[in-house]
Image (tube, coloured by chain):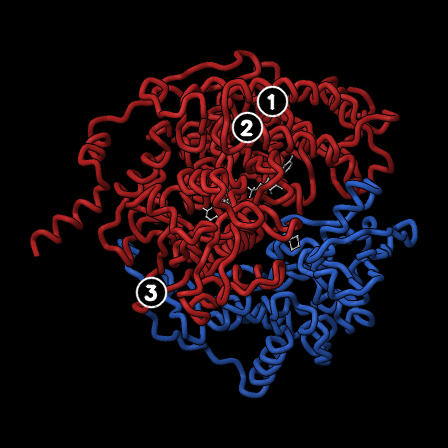
Chain colours: A blue, B red
């Protein structure tokens, strides 16, 4: 099949005519262009299997991973643009600095509660597990931030990925930085209140995460706190792992 | 100092870690204690390192599901599968410490899958005597990497993303002094000075056309160390994973996790025979990787291959619910990339280059190399896996020796008053070398050179080898290396993929030669190294590791001999835990 690939490059739009085989991905075609037609074409890729989150871009107007988007679904003309709301370095490569600093702002790491000495058992069907599972899937590809409509008006908005991570930790019984984190996500300009549940992030997430759900939960927690005051969270009944023998 | 060098952006750290995969991050976390500055560099963005792809799990002998397991049995399996050219001191520490390192990850936020009674779940994997791999679905590597990454952020380690190191710098006394690198985004050079350096740059699977590895695995660290005078060991040992994807062409080589066989998947040839019953009646599909890969290769050679030259893997008998829960990533990967529903159909698999056992020779205690101040951990280092790596042993390796390398570098840095001085002339020469491809007109295209290199490696130093074939391959490689001195690139220094590829290719060419030389020296078949002109494993060859350095060439160095208390573990001809289990059975 003959496909016209239009790439929005730093120097303007470039058009490449490519003969594609069955079941090729956008990434395959980008490599073909880079190796055979123009070795200066820049894009990111690492794993080729949708695990690392490097190859996010806007494909025919919608955010997607190049390595996971088959050409057969795209028609005879494929338009590739860099992700939105992030500065461009070159061609399809964007500056992820903003994405990462937003992540950092929510303190993305577990701050263990001092009274919990041993690792906590999270049984596969427990609530804790559910909350954590949500976060496990995120590959920090940045597609949600690119698709987020709020970002156009409010560039400071922390965005879906960071807020999703914040919620995972706030919901994690092992974590002790809940208050500080809630304060961050509750900020007027950058926090959860900016989200108007357009669901664009949910639509583009390659891992089917629903950051809007996490954001809704965060809003609820903030409201409860405002009206009920701050109450010490009881430590749930924990099962401990015996260190010897795991 | 020339103005060019004087105006160079420069950073000084007590400990510099090159590589932000699992091993590098674990090392950085260990070295960063109050009062000690640590920097970590990665060629890609944070969290995108090759480690992210690891699916199956991390091997640690908790004995949670098979209570007979223990460190002795993990040690036994590791040495046996490595065909006894591993460094037993490394394997022993490894087997002892893996469990602790896994539990530590949980303290830092990771949550491994659980048994019904709440212990860490363990799955079976090839050539492990017991169910041993702790896992998080089939995205263990991702969670490991993420946990370490967050830990690093919480410890204020300075992180450099998309920075490529092109040279390790030493002082006049031969001690490590730092590294020269460039930002991929701008092409600007940056100088790192450090008291100690940990090398954790991963392997070189990209030398082969069919590979499961990510684009990063171009062996930069191995080449950097070799050029700086480090000793490289067991370079002939390249692991071919038995099950890579075969079709469609774009996905060729992508890994089909061993977890599929671990969870019950069976291998068939085109005639519907379960051929592993014949090649290894005891361990069958879960035999060691070298054996399964070779078996598939032999079946295809004998004309019993699948339409695209592989074998059938079938797990449909486990049922859709089980498959989707246990192997969600694989299910999704086949559905989206190959349009195959593995809960309903068998699918084609064939061997793919997966792991490089050889690498920088490092000692067991601190991962120190022969260059003072340089430590090496993870896939770039050598010694743990011998002639064949066990699945799951790499992630455990990253944790155990990442930590040890971090500790070693920290101790070394504390003993040193300040970072060694760097030589301005050397830096200038290196910058000129790296910039040279911009001024070559009508030179070679780096992508083409890479492709030709992959052809040579696959044809002459792949899963099957022989003396004459290796000689031929080496000659081709040398001709290619000559041509590669004239690589050219166009465009600017800003995120220029062709320019980046030049450096990658230079690294790979250097290591390719070491693979050939090692493979020629090892005149036998052992583990992953299979020579048709020497088809047997030879006891006298098993006494040597082949060590190569830029000054000394190839040298045979004796494999360290186990003391009695360890060698006795092998006297029964069966794993210690398996023996205990058998005894218990007899008593009942
Ligand atoms: C598909 C797949 C599945 C796997 N599954 C498992 C499994 O289930 N269990 C298991 O134990 N093992 C598994 N492995 C093997 C394991 O993932 C790797 O061996 C391991 O992750 C290597 O980690 P590392 O830290 O040594 O290096 P890597 O993760 O490769 O990281 C290397 C780092 O060095 C950086 N770097 C490289 N060159 C330079 C340079 N010139 N300048 C600056 N930085 C540089 C890179 O950017 C990167 O950050 C799997 C491998 C693959 C490919
Ligand atoms: S290349 Fe890793 S997600 Fe696409």
Q: Are marks 3 and 1 in contact (CB under 8 Å)?
A: no
Q: Quadrant of ligand 2?
A: bottom right
Numbered disc 1: what chain? B
Query: Which element type, helix, strand or loop, lies under badge 2?
Result: loop
The residue that disc 2 covers is: B461
| CA distance for labels 2 and 3 | 43 Å
Measuring from the top left, give residue A152's x and y in whole percent.
Answer: 82, 70
Measuring from the top left, give residue B258's x and y in whole percent.
Answer: 44, 51
The 10 Å Cα crowd at callout 2, few under 14, some 14 to 19, many 20 or more, is many
Disc with the residue nearer the chain's start (2 vs 3): 3
Which label was assigned to residue B473?
1
| CA distance for labels 2 and 1 | 7 Å
Disc with the residue nearer the chain's start (2 vs 1): 2
Q: Are marks 2 and 1 in contact (CB under 8 Å)?
A: yes
Q: Tell me whether marks 2 and 3 sit on the same chain.
A: yes
Q: Considering only vertical position in the picture, is B273 above or below B448?
A: below
Q: Nearer the viewer, residue B228 or B328?
A: B328
The residue that disc 3 covers is: B115
| CA distance for labels 3 and 1 | 50 Å
Q: Quadrant of the N terminus of chain A?
A: bottom right
Disc with the residue nearer the chain's start (3 vs 1): 3
Query: Which element type, helix, strand or loop, lies under badge 1?
Result: helix
The 10 Å Cα crowd at callout 1, few under 14, some 14 to 19, many 20 or more, is many
């Amino acid at each position: 099949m003959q496909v016209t690939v239009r790439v929005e490059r730093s120097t303007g739009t470039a058009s490449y005519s490519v003969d594609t085989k069955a079941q090729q991905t956008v990434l395959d075609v980008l490599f073909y262009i880079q190796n055979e037609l123009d070795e200066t074409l820049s894009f990111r890729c690492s794993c080729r299997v949708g695990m690392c989150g490097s190859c996010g871009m806007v494909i025919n107007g919608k955010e997607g991973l190049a390595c996971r988007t088959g050409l057969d679904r795209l028609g005879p003309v494929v338009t590739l643009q860099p992700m939105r709301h992030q500065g461009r370095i070159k061609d399809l490569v964007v500056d992820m600095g903003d994405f990462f600093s937003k992540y950092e702002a929510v303190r993305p790491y577990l701050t263990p509660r001092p009274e919990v000495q041993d690792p906590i058992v999270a049984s596969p069907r427990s609530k804790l597990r559910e909350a954590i599972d949500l976060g496990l899937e995120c590959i920090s590809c940045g597609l949600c931030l690119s698709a987020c409509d709020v970002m156009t008006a409010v560039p400071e908005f922390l965005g879906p990925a960071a807020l999703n991570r914040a919620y995972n930790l706030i919901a994690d019984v092992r974590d002790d930085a809940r208050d500080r984190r809630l304060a961050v996500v509750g900020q007027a300009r950058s926090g959860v209140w900016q989200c108007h549940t357009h669901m664009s992030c949910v639509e583009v997430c390659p891992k089917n995460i629903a950051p809007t759900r996490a954001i809704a939960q965060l809003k609820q927690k903030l409201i409860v706190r405002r009206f009920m005051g701050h109450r010490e969270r009881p430590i749930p009944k924990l099962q401990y792992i015996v260190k010897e023998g795991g | 100092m020339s103005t060019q060098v004087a105006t160079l952006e420069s950073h000084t750290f007590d400990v510099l870690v090159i590589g932000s995969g699992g091993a590098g991050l674990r090392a950085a976390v260990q070295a960063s204690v109050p009062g000690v500055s640590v920097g970590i560099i990665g060629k890609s963005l944070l969290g995108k390192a090759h480690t992210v792809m690891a699916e199956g799990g991390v091997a640690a002998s908790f004995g949670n599901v098979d209570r007979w397991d223990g460190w002795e049995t993990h040690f036994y399996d590791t040495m046996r599968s490595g065909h006894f050219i591993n460094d037993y001191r490394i394997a022993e520490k490894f087997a002892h410490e893996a469990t602790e390192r896994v539990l530590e990850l949980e303290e830092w936020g990771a949550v491994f899958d659980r048994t019904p009674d709440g212990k860490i779940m363990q799955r079976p994997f090839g050539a492990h005597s017991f169910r041993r791999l702790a896992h998080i679905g089939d995205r263990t590597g991702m969670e490991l990497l993420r946990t370490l990454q967050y830990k690093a952020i919480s410890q204020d380690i300075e992180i450099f993303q998309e920075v490529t190191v092109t040279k390790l710098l030493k002082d006049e006394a031969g001690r490590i002094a730092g590294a020269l690198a460039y930002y991929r985004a701008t092409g600007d050079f940056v100088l790192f000075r450090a008291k100690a350096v940990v090398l954790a740059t991963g392997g070189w699977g990209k030398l082969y056309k069919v590979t499961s590895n990510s684009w990063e695995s171009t062996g930069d660290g191995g080449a950097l160390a070799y050029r700086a005078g480090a000793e490289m060991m067991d370079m002939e040992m390249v692991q071919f994973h038995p099950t890579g994807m075969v079709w469609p062409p774009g996905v060729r080589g992508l890994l089909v996790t061993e977890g599929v066989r671990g969870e019950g998947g069976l291998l068939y040839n085109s005639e519907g025979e379960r051929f592993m019953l014949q090649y290894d009646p005891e361990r069958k599909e879960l035999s060691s990787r070298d054996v399964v890969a070779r078996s598939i290769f032999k079946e295809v050679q004998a004309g019993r291959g699948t339409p695209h030259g592989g074998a059938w893997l079938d797990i449909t008998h486990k049922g859709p619910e089980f498959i989707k829960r246990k192997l969600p990533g694989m299910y999704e990967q086949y559905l989206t990339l190959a349009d195959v529903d593995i809960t309903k159909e068998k699918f084609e698999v064939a061997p793919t280059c997966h792991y490089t056992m050889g690498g920088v020779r490092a000692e067991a205690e601190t991962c120190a190399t022969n260059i003072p101040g340089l430590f090496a951990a993870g896939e770039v280092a050598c010694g743990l896996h011998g002639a064949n790596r066990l699945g799951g042993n790499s992630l455990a390796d990253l944790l155990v020796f990442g930590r040890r390398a971090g500790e070693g570098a920290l101790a070394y840095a504390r003993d040193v008053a300040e970072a060694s001085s760097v030589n301005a002339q050397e830096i200038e020469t290196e910058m000129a070398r790296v910039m040279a491809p911009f001024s070559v007109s009508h030179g070679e295209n780096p992508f083409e050179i890479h492709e030709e290199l992959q052809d040579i490696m696959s044809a002459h130093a792949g899963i099957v080898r022989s003396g004459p074939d290796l000689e031929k391959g080496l000659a081709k490689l040398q001709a290619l290396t000559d041509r590669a001195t004239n690589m050219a690139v166009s465009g600017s220094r800003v995120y220029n993929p062709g320019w980046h590829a030049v450096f990658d290719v230079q690294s790979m060419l250097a290591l390719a030669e070491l693979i050939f030389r090692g493979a020629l020296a090892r005149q036998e078949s052992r583990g992953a190294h299979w020579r048709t002109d020497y088809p047997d494993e030879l006891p006298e060859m098993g006494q040597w590791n082949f060590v190569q350095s830029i000054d000394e060439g190839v040298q045979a160095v004796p494999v360290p001999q186990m003391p009695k208390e360890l060698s006795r573990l092998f006297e029964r001809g069966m794993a210690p835990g398996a023996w205990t289990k058998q005894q218990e059975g007899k008593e009942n």
